[in-house]
């Protein structure tokens, strides 16, 4: 993200806060959060809304699956019936916009991706400010414990004006999965720098044997975080202090050239149509040396019913770029629809979903990086983490060097669409500088219009 010492716009301040504190293991809460937690003790009854029913809109993902699996636990605890729908990510985002705009959404609670929906939801006032519940002794569970939430998650959840529009649930720093067997066969060590990363991809790429030196998202829109992962390492930024795009800067162009080289030269055939699932499938088969994506894929990689490389996967922190070593960060949480007529029971669901037990379950299942610090100690004590120790260490290190992987703007989907086309064109041989200049010129008016709205 942008790093401007004198940029004091609210979203710039948020970015600096997030950059200053994203470590998942050793981070406290926002200033005053401990006081809020202390105030929130008192008379509280999980059965307060017994007999009511709420509707939940989740994203189809390992984390959505996990919550759904334990909904019966919530129903037994509270007497509140849960109706839930799980929708694939892109469709869920479209459904949310359509239903919110209707003024009568079908859900009381919604899972949101901060990097895509945070600014959009806030500007349209689609979510409920949770402070009224946090500060009500009769509504805040004794174990809500804001001091247990990592700063990286809370800074995403809290608006610049102090509103708390959601509870964070998961952090997703990007990492490099690497095939130890392929590396060892060629005598290649895990790369420490971008230059070494390209060199490793070149040495390990073997088209004749169907082995890709590198795999990642080439599909338009989905591919943008791969490029921005490189951009951050080059010291690049998305915008300046005045909102002018910096996506055709020298840093942006060099990082795009790296994307073009890794995907276009050392990627698999047809990579321009790859999203994360196609990339994962190739890596699972042992047909790719490196795969760059989010932290939450250890479970299938270590599952012998799905993976041919169990025990051969390396979990690598993003190599250092010329200017910085950064892991692109994404995150998600859950909020209450502003239109909900059942905000009380919906708030109970948010507290349960983000409680310490569920956060520990996320880690035990290797489904992501929990936002609660206590989850790490609890999972390690239980010895039930379904991933190697190397994965946990990689996650913690990556979280400690993480920065937002997308600009925090309302039209982030359009940003991904426009620049995604440019990146896909690069895979097919287009000039990176030309493509970025075109995309920047196309998107700047869209960004300007959104900021004035």
Image (spheres, grey):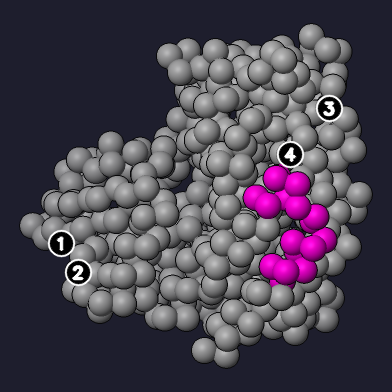
Q: Is residue 72 left or right of residue 281?
A: left
Which of the two residues, 162 or 9, is positioned nearer the viewer here?
9
Residue 178 lies in the magenta-colored region: no
Dot placed on the residue nearer the N-terminal end, 1 or 4:
1
Sequence order check, earlier mark of 4 and 2: 4
The numbered disc on residue 382 is none
Of mark 2 and mark 3, the one earlier in the sequence is 3
Q: Which residue is mark 2?
A: 342
The residue carrying pointer 2 sits among few (fewer than 14), some (14 to 19) or many (20 or more) residues within 10 Å by Cα, namely some
Q: Which of the 4 quarters of the picture holds residue 192?
A: top right
Q: Which residue is mark 1?
A: 49
Q: Is residue 405 above or below residue 205?
A: below
Q: Are marks 1 and 2 in contact (CB under 8 Å)?
A: yes
Q: CA distance from mark 4 to mark 3?
A: 12 Å
Secondary structure beneath disc 3?
helix
Label 3: how many residues lie within 10 Å, few (<14), some (14-19) or many (20+)?
Answer: some
| Prevailing SS of the magenta stretch | helix
In the image, residue 232 lies at what x, y percent? 78, 55
Please name which of the two marks, 4 or 3, marks the residue nearer to the observer.
Answer: 4
């Amino acid at each position: 993200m942008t790093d401007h010492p004198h940029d004091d716009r609210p979203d710039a301040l948020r970015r600096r806060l997030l950059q200053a504190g994203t470590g998942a293991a050793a981070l406290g809460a926002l200033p005053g959060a401990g006081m809020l937690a202390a105030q929130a003790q008192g008379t509280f009854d999980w059965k307060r809304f017994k007999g009511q029913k709420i509707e939940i809109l989740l994203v189809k993902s390992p984390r959505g699956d996990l919550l759904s699996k334990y909904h019966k636990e919530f129903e037994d605890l509270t007497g509140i019936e849960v109706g839930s729908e799980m929708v694939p990510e892109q469709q869920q985002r479209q459904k949310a916009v359509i239903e919110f705009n209707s003024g009568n959404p079908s859900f009381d609670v919604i899972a949101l991706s901060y990097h895509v929906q945070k600014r959009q939801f806030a500007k349209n006032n689609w979510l409920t400010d949770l402070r009224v519940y946090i500060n009500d002794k009769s509504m805040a569970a004794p174990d809500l414990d804001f001091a247990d939430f990592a700063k990286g998650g809370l800074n995403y959840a809290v608006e610049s004006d102090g509103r708390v529009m959601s509870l964070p649930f998961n952090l997703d720093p990007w990492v490099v999965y690497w095939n130890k067997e392929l590396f060892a066969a060629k005598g290649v060590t895990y790369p420490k720098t971008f230059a070494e990363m390209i060199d490793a991809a070149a040495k390990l790429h073997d088209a004749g044997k169907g082995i890709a030196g590198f795999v990642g998202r080439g599909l338009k829109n989905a591919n943008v975080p791969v490029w921005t992962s490189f951009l951050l390492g080059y010291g690049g930024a998305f915008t300046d202090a005045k909102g002018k795009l910096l996506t055709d800067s020298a840093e942006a162009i060099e990082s795009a050239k790296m994307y073009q080289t890794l995907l276009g030269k050392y990627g698999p055939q047809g990579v321009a149509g790859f999203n994360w699932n196609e990339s994962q499938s190739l890596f699972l088969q042992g047909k790719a040396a490196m795969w760059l994506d989010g932290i939450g894929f250890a479970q299938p990689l270590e599952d012998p019913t799905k993976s041919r490389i169990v025990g051969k996967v390396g979990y690598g922190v993003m190599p250092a770029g010329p200017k910085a070593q950064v892991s692109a960060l994404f995150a998600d949480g859950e909020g209450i629809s502003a239109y909900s007529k059942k905000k009380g029971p919906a708030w109970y669901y948010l507290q349960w979903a983000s409680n310490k037990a569920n956060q520990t379950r996320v880690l035990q299942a290797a489904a992501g990086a929990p936002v609660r610090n206590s989850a790490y100690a609890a999972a390690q004590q239980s010895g039930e983490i379904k991933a190697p120790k190397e994965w946990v260490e990689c996650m913690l290190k990556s979280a400690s060097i993480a920065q937002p992987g997308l600009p925090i703007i309302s039209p982030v989907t359009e940003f991904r669409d426009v620049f995604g086309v440019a990146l896909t064109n690069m895979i097919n041989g287009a000039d990176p500088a030309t493509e970025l200049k075109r995309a920047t010129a196309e998107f700047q008016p869209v960004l300007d219009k959104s900021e004035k709205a």
